[in-house]
Amino acid sequence: MQLRERNRGSSPMIGLTPLIDVVFILLIFFMLASSFLDWKGFEMSVAITDGKSTSQSDVRPVTIDVNANGALSLNGEAVSLSGLPQMLLRDHSGAPVRLRPVNGASLQHLINVMDALGRGGVTNVDLVE
């Protein structure tokens, strides 16, 4: 009886070693179960040009300018990102597309445009400066 009364005021000790072991096992499991090799990439060609056409074909390339704020212009005319692929396929079918960043356009804006073009079926895209 005396022993029970003496330990009644103290709380039982919880060991953290099993908890740490479980956390490390879960960490190793998720590291091994994850796949870091399934990266998606954009297939594109980078051409440094002075704005003149170097192609020998009769089809003139289409130039899309991307501004720093994400505004797009197709051969100098303002266009929205949502209607860009349909306009290219309707008016400039088969023409190579040149994507040009202007006024410090961010890489994210260029990726958004390339993604929209790829989903819209436009495949011949070059990045020019």
Image (cartoon, grey):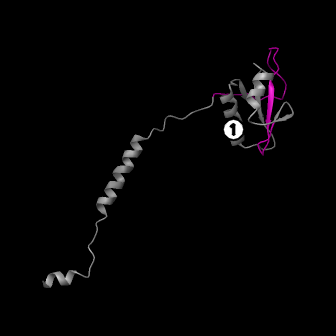
Q: Residues within 10 Å of mark 1 (few under 14, many from 20)?
A: few
Compared across the picture, whether 85 is left or right of 52 comes to left
Along the viewing direction, whichever of 72 and 57 lies nearer the viewer: 72
Q: Which image quarter is the N terminus in?
A: bottom left
x and y percentages locating residue 60 in the rendered image: 82, 20
Could you tell me which secondary element the residue under label 1 belongs to?
A: helix
* Residue in the picture at 17% in, 81% down: 4
Does residue 20 sit above or below 124 in this rendering?
below
Q: Is residue 6 left or right of residue 73?
A: left
Residue at image mark 1:
112
| Above-or-below relation of 69 to 76 | below
Q: Based on the displayed image, in which of its 4 quarters is residue 40 positioned? A: top right
Total labels drawn? 1
Q: Is residue 58 magenta?
A: yes
Name the residue rendered at 59%, 32% in the picture: 41
Name which residue lies at 68% across and 24% down: 123
The answer to whether residue 96 is seen in the rendering is no
In this view, which residue lies farthest toward the left? 1
Identified by mark 1, the residue type is Asn
Residue pictured at 69% horizontal, 38% vertical: 112
Residue 5: quadrant of the picture: bottom left
Where are the magenta residues, as a range? Answer: 43-72
Q: What percent of the width, then of the height, locates residue 30?
A: 40, 45
Quadrant for the C terminus, please: top right
